[in-house]
Image (cartoon, grey):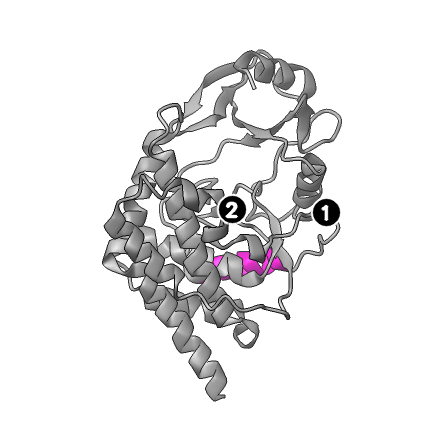
């Protein structure tokens, strides 16, 4: 969406104090524009692409479903009361600008947010996550990186992929998942008050998907911390330890890591990518995690927990 289109929409469709002016783009995030009105109030305008299947309507319903939760960043409503404003084949979300958080929340905070999200009944609104399409060897993503990924790195990735059970999980419960419970998706209104952002990747999936994605993100970005302590606190705080399928969490973690590694490898070669530098830094972190055995350490935790469950 062009900047002039964004400013026109914000002036005509939102109750901002005119004049509204564009301040800049959030570094590394070309779809996020910083906006300020004549009274000095700062906002973030976010452009999203229509993914089809009534995506904007689903996203609207999701945000309304979590409306009022102080720990979740909700878009500002337009003059027509819409949280997601549709413009041609794109959408626009307007938020009050938040700050970088001084200290990232602990595992207990993340577990609480997961339970709040997973408890929402949104079955008829949200597209389902497809476990059978999640295997890297079945995706173009995996094939496209065959020639550009270093062979030693690819061998280590294959070892992780080969640890996947590839069995049919017949009793999976599909619930609402955030889909991107990462440290980069936590900001603050000031001080230590953590606010969860970015609900554009919401999907119906096993709860193990959100759990492993958060755990993997913590491990990759906090290499000096005790990953096992974080793992134990996250699982225990979730309060559904007996219901967690650790074998499924193991497989999702292995496949999610391999899928993301392949995606980042491809992105690092894309000269036209506006957020290329940010993605290259992330790629380096994933490569280091592979080299240092961090992923296999998490997978071993899952195997150990599965063994304890069987022994009960």
Circle 2 residues within 10 Å: few <14, some 14–19, many ≥20: many
- Of 70 and 165, the residue lying toward us: 165
Please tell me whether residue 189 is drawn above or below residue 273 in the rendered image.
below
What secondary structure is marked by label 1? loop
Q: Position of residue 292 (x, y in %)?
A: 24, 57
Image side of residue 232 versus residue 86, left or right: left
The one nearer the camera, 215 or 33, is: 215
Separation of marks 1 and 2 at Cα, in angstroms: 21 Å
Residue position marked by numbered label 2 in the rendering: 196
- Please, which residue is most extreme toward the bottom here? 312
Q: Is the magenta stretch mostly helix, strand or loop?
A: helix
Question: x and y percent of residue 156 in the render?
Answer: 29, 57
Residue 196's x, y, as percent?
51, 46
- Residue 99 included in the magenta stretch of the image: no
Which range of residues does the magenta coloring cover?
A: 108-118
Residue at 30% x, 60% y: name it: 294
Q: Can residue 186 be seen in this view?
A: no
- Quadrant housing residue 290: bottom left
> Residue 113: x and y, percent?
54, 56
Q: Residue at x 48, y 40 (%)?
A: 189
Q: Is mark 2 on a helix, strand or loop?
A: strand
């Amino acid at each position: 969406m062009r900047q002039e289109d964004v400013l026109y929409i914000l002036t005509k469709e939102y109750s901002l104090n005119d004049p509204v002016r564009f301040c800049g783009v959030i570094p590394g995030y070309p779809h996020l524009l910083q906006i300020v009105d004549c009274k000095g109030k700062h906002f973030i305008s976010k452009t999203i692409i229509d993914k089809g299947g009534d995506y904007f309507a689903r996203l609207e319903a999701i945000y309304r479903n979590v409306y009022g939760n102080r720990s979740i960043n909700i878009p500002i409503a337009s003059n027509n009361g819409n949280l997601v404003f549709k413009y041609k084949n794109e959408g626009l979300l307007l938020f009050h600008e938040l700050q970088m958080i001084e200290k990232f929340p602990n595992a207990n905070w993340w577990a609480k947010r997961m339970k709040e999200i997973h408890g929402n009944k949104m079955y008829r609104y949200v597209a389902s996550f497809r476990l059978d399409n999640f295997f890297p060897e079945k995706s173009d993503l995996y094939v496209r990186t065959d020639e550009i990924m270093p062979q030693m790195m690819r061998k280590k990735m294959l070892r992780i992929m080969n640890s996947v059970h590839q069995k049919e999980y017949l009793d999976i419960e599909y619930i609402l998942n955030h889909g991107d419970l990462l440290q980069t998706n936590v900001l603050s209104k000031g001080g230590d008050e953590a606010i969860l952002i970015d609900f554009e990747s919401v999907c119906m999936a096993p709860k193990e998907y959100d759990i492993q994605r958060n755990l993997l993100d913590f491990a990759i970005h906090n290499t000096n911390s005790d990953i096992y302590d974080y793992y134990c606190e996250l699982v225990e705080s979730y309060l559904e330890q007996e219901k967690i399928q650790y074998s499924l969490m193991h497989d999702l973690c292995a496949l999610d890591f391999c899928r993301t590694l392949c995606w980042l490898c491809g992105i690092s070669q894309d000269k036209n990518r506006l957020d290329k530098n940010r993605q290259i830094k992330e790629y380096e972190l994933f490569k280091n995690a592979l080299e240092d055995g961090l992923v296999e350490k998490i997978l071993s935790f899952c195997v150990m927990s599965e063994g304890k469950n069987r022994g009960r």
